[in-house]
Amino acid sequence: MKISASIYSSKDKSLSEIITELDHHEVDFFHVDCNDEHRVFEDIAYINDHSITPADVHIISATPTDYFAGIARCQVRQVSFQYENFTAPIDFQLLKSLAPHTEIGLAITSLTSVDVFELYVDSCSFVLLMTTTPGQSGGVFDKNTFRKIRQFQKKFPGKRIQVDGGVNAEVSFILRNLGVDCAVVGSYLFSKGYVGAALLNLKKQVVGSHFLLKDFMLMMDELPVLEESMITFETALQKIEDYKMAFTLVTDANGMLKGLISNADVRRGLLKNSQNLQNIMANDIINPNPLRMKENKTIYDLLLFIKQAPFPLQYLPVVNDENKLTGSILFTNLIKGEL
């Protein structure tokens, strides 16, 4: 996951000092918030003259088209526009004609549905999910953003996701493993005294253990689940196919976790009954005792569990204290996020 450093979050260093320090530690972008201030292009021009690290600009204005010329003049690598400030639909094709190499994104607050991205899906290559007040530093991360990330990924596959607001090392770990492309970081980066250590935490480590599994797991309405009384070989295959997650979870009538059916379980069932596929029974394909974790366990607990697991984990059912299924963790992006 890339890190875009919010340069205006540092209050005690000059722009020159900030750029030099961040370049030394190979940050991916310089994030520049523009609260209807054209003077930011002076800073962007300075960045272009003194660094090869690209600018990542966030425009917060009721008249975003007023900034198109400055974006083109400074050859901004990527720019996002705050949707809630629009007073009329924006023609981003004009910007694309002026700055064909600039990637355009739509920034939305936590209260705005990801569905609005549909209005600009042909022009925008990424969304910027704001978890705190746009343009302000030092906010607290909104954990509802985790679900919003999954909603956006499902609705707009192939479009990148950036997250801005309250990102620290622990949040960064979750974002990396949800497949987020880039995180905008300000206060955490500059308040630690040593930018290099903060960047290492953001990219490779997890510090603290504030969030619980239930805060970022896939919820029941996002998961393939079959009641055990309804399971046949065909229904299990269809559920796996419909959700494209390589497994389906099994519960009883009361929602208690009774097992899991994975692609590997289906394969074993086929091999066991290769001479007569009509003989395949539900018990042939259900793993009745899959690994699981409690929903109130922390990220630190999860990391220990992964480390001690007897085999690599691709998914992990999550239950409450009564063993009722409440969600699941996927590890699709675990290796990708940690590279």
Image (tube, rainbow, N blue to C red):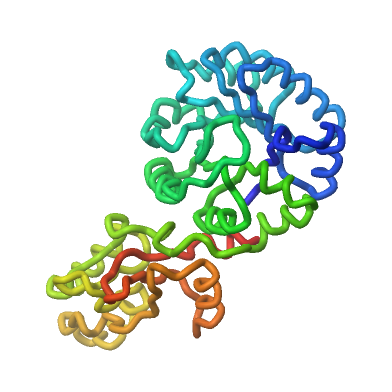
Residue 206, quarter of picture? bottom right
Q: Is residue 1 left or right of residue 178?
A: right
Percent from the top left, x then y, of residue 196?
A: 79, 53
126 or 110: nearer the viewer: 110
Left or right of residue 136: residue 331 = left
At a point 41% along the width and 68% down the height, the residue shown is: 296
The residue located at (64%, 23%) in the rendering is 34
Query: Vertical placement of 23 versus 200: above or below?
Result: above
Q: Residue at x 40, y 26 (%)?
A: 119
Q: Position of residue 316 (x, y in %)?
A: 40, 71
Where is residue 154 shown, x and y percent of the image?
38, 47
In the picture, the quarter occupied by the C terminus is bottom right
Q: Is residue 254 left or right of residue 143?
A: left
Give coordinates of residue 308: x percent, y percent: 53, 82
- Residue toward you, 13 or 220: 13
Task: Report whether residue 270 is seen.
Answer: no
Tell me which corner region of the image, top left, top right, bottom left or bottom right, holds residue 64.
top right
Instruction: Looking at the picture, tell me which residue is in the foreground, 216 or 289.
Output: 216
Residue 73, by quadrant, is: top right
Residue at 50% in and 38% down: 129
Q: In the picture shown, does residue 61 fall above or below 54? A: above
Q: Is residue 104 left or right of residue 54?
A: left
Q: How many marks?
A: 0
In this rendering, does residue 138 appear at all? yes
Is residue 151 placed above or below 235 in the rendered structure?
A: above
- In the displayed structure, 173 sits above or below 36; it is below
